[in-house]
Image (cartoon, rainbow, N blue to C red):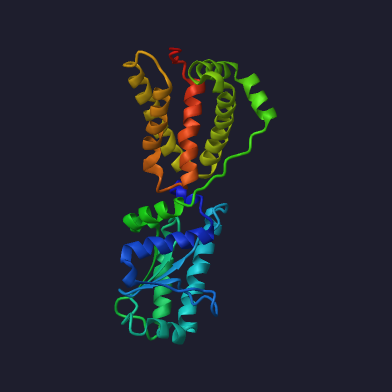
Amino acid sequence: MDIFIEQLTPKEWEGYCARMLRFHYVSNNFWDVPDTDRGDLGLEFFTIDGTLFQCYYPDKNVDMAAYKKKVQNKIRGDLKKLKTNEGEIAKLLDGVVVKVKRWVLLIPEMKSKDLIKYCNTKKKALLKDPPAFIDTDDFQVKIDTADSYPDGALFAKQIHAKTVDIPLAEVTDTEKAIWKEGHTEFSANIERKSDTFMGEKATRFKDNVVKKYIQIEKFLDNLRENYPDLHELVEDSARAQLEKIRNESLFEDALDKQFVSNVVKGNEQAFSKHAKFMSDSNMQSLSFGYLSKWLAECYMDFSDE
């Protein structure tokens, strides 16, 4: 299963599916059916081509037998609702869909071919006494995943991930002192570089760099745990940017304030490709956080001229 989808809650999965299908079918051909007014009718979306969609996110922490039973119960229960709510559904479809040709259950992952056979069985059962809006000559019951809608899935992922907004952790003076004791080489790098190019402003600058370093490490831990795919993208950009800095430094007689300013701008540009996934504040955290990591972890020196 896609790691991003694996992180979703059942409610988030429903929202993800809505965005994915709206993109795939185009808004004018797609209808979202809210369940807050008089309950669930056995469908969450329908489209102009006669497809009814229902979403389901089964429990990931069950064995195969329990998984299949849960999905089968969902299919059986929601297909029954089509007949029970026949009149109400017909009113929704009136003037939009001539006949319903497909009922589709969207789940994160298809784990068993037995579910395909079960869909065929339930289709035959439904057609023994079908709702009037069903096309009995061309009706299907099937299971789909996001893989069936690749462009829509990518769009939905980008929209969903844009809500990523990890707040920066507060850092106490005690934490900074403990960090310096445990990272003497990194701390020495910060001391040396800050004294060289910040002069009388070095004390405040050094304190801020240590704070930013601790914050970006916590930020990246959070990102790695909760958004592993996005974390890998960020780390790839950071590695490429570090290599770029190293290459550019070879052509500099001395590393000074201007070089540091260029590092910040370079970071902003390197991480800009991820702006569609993250909040503006998180983007700023990356740019200045990775500057602090570079100052601490890189042993290139600065000019004191």
Q: Residue furthest right?
A: 174
Q: Which of the pair 226/234 is nearer the observer?
A: 234
In the image, residue 287 above or below residue 39: above
Depicted 5 relative to depicted 287: above or below: below
Q: Quadrant of the C terminus?
A: top left
**Res 59 quadrant in image:** bottom right
Q: Is residue 241 left or right of residue 219?
A: left
Judge whether residue 21 can be spotted in this image: yes
Q: Residue at x 45, y 50 (%)?
A: 161
Q: How many marks?
A: 0
- Where does the image place residue 198, in percent across and percent down from the top left? 51, 21
Q: Is residue 164 above or below residue 26?
A: above
Q: Residue at x 32, y 66 (%)?
A: 25
Q: Percent x, y for residue 248?
A: 33, 21
Q: Position of residue 2 (x, y in %)?
A: 43, 48
Instruction: Residue at the far front: name it.
Output: 200
Depth check, front residue: 58 or 207 = 207
**x, y (%) of residue 22?**
36, 65
Determine whether 197 is above or below 60 in the image: above
- Residue drawn at x 41%, y 68% as measured from the top left: 119
Quadrant hosting residue 200: top right
